[in-house]
Amino acid sequence: MTTELPRTQEQLPPEFFTAPEGNDLHTANAKLRASGCPVQAINYPVGGEGYVVADYTTVLKAFSDPRLSKRVDNAPAWFRDLVKDSSPVLVRNMLTADPPEHTRLRKLVSRAFVPRRMELLRPRVQEITDELIDAFPEQGEVNLMEFAFSLPMRVICEFLGVPVADRPQLHTWGNWLSGAPYPDAESNEKLKDASENIERYLLDLLADRRANLGDDLVSILVRAADEEDRFTNDELVSTLVLLIIAGHKTTANLIGSGTHALLTHPDQLELLRSRPELADSAVEEFLRFESPVYRGTLRVAAEDMELGGCPIPKESFVHLLMGSANRDPEAFEKPDELDITRTANRHLAFGQGAHFCVGAPLSRVEGNIAFTTLLRRLPGLRLAVPADEIDWLFDNSTSRGLVKLPVTYDARLPAGTRPAADTSQDR
């Protein structure tokens, strides 16, 4: 029987996530951190018992707290029924599992995403980046979010061996699934359709790979599953859905938000343009400054517990605000300043502990190549509209990104162009 524990404060409204005051999530997070209570109640999901965790120290500890479960079965009955009815394909992978099940499922994909293997993809990622920029007009205006989404989507689909013609549909289904579940019946019906369609598609893809094994990631997963006989087809499908969603949306937000950060900080833009060797530390700073996933995915209290001095009843939803933790002045010096030379950048953008993002090495490679190539090939890159006209997307997903990023530039230089600072070395 669940012991009812008293609330310690008024609930935050669900609009804290979907429509923060002034559309400024960072200001809202700063108010939470300054309130003196690192954990506060929120009515999210609507009608549920929820709590947000805003400070770095408590978020870091919570990532490894075994009392916080990732399993949907530990959530309230109404939520379990909603998820299993509308998107059952989402609840059979490592993101919705606790050890030892999580350990088994993570093993299925971790060998494919080691940094060494991701570095081997670098030449192909560079080719794809240049091909996408080749399609830009010689000069003028483009919505850079289209590039930001296309690059990681093409990379993950090539990695999976998905035919080119099928990729737009996978992108559409993935966008629906990344927001699950929805607060209204009509959206959940569309979500259910997306879940059923992507499951059918991936079952066909698995059958094709079993008949024609290759070197793509799907073939790697099929071999691992069949050789060890420890993974079901449902688990393989759910894992592939996770890779498609996480493999493109978060990196797209990194590229879009990182470019926006550069274009609104001219000193940092010029620094990276003149010193492309800073790209690795720049990527880490973009991840901290505008975290692509601003709050953690599903976590529920598996028992009555206390976190940051706040009692949390069993079956409560606990939202770890990585975007807030990454701006905590107790953890970062001048956290609201963009500094691409920042060292010892202990950001939590990829999570921490057992659920640290398995795709982080690929995302870092893609970000490094995207930023250096954009600055090298698009001289005079700048916003095409005033900065205050750029809109952030607020929905019920855990990601943070831009609706559009209109940019312009002086001229599109050909692939292989070297930075002006390096040309003197050819003389």
Image (spheres, rainbow, N blue to C red):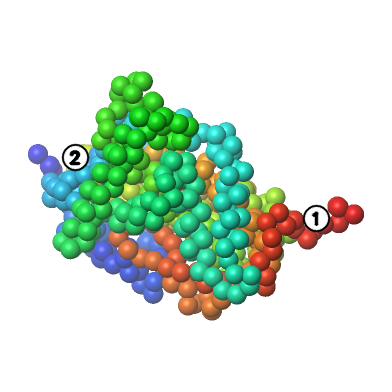
**Residue 104 versus residue 234: which sits nearer the camera?**
234
Type of amino acid at the residue the image marks with label 1 = Asp
Element class at badge 1: helix
Task: Using a 10 Å C-alpha cutoff, classify the residue at mark 1 as few (fewer than 14 neighbours), some (14 to 19) or many (20 or more).
Answer: few
Q: Residue at x 51, y 69 (%)?
A: 143
**Residue 35 versus residue 193: which sits nearer the camera?**
193
Left or right: 78 with respect to 289?
Answer: left
Task: Using a 10 Å C-alpha cutoff, classify the residue at mark 2 as few (fewer than 14 neighbours), some (14 to 19) or many (20 or more).
Answer: some
Q: Residue at x 39, y 26 (%)?
A: 223
Circle on res. 422: 1
Q: Residue at x 55, y 34 (%)?
A: 117
Looking at this view, name the residue that lies furthest to the left: 1
Residue 351 place in picture, x, y as percent = 43, 44
Left or right: 340 with respect to 42?
Answer: right
Relative to 350, say whether 24 is above or below. below
Residue 381 place in picture, x, y as percent = 63, 69
Q: Quadrant of residue 73?
A: top left
Left or right: 128 with respect to 85?
Answer: right
Circles 1, 2 touching at the beta carbon (< 8 Å):
no
| Residue 75 visible in the displayed image | yes
**Residue 96 versus residue 302: which sits nearer the camera?**
96
Type of amino acid at the residue the image marks with label 2 = Asp
Element class at badge 2: helix
Provide the residue designation for mark 2.
73
Circle on res. 212: none
Which label sits in the foreground, 1 or 2? Answer: 1
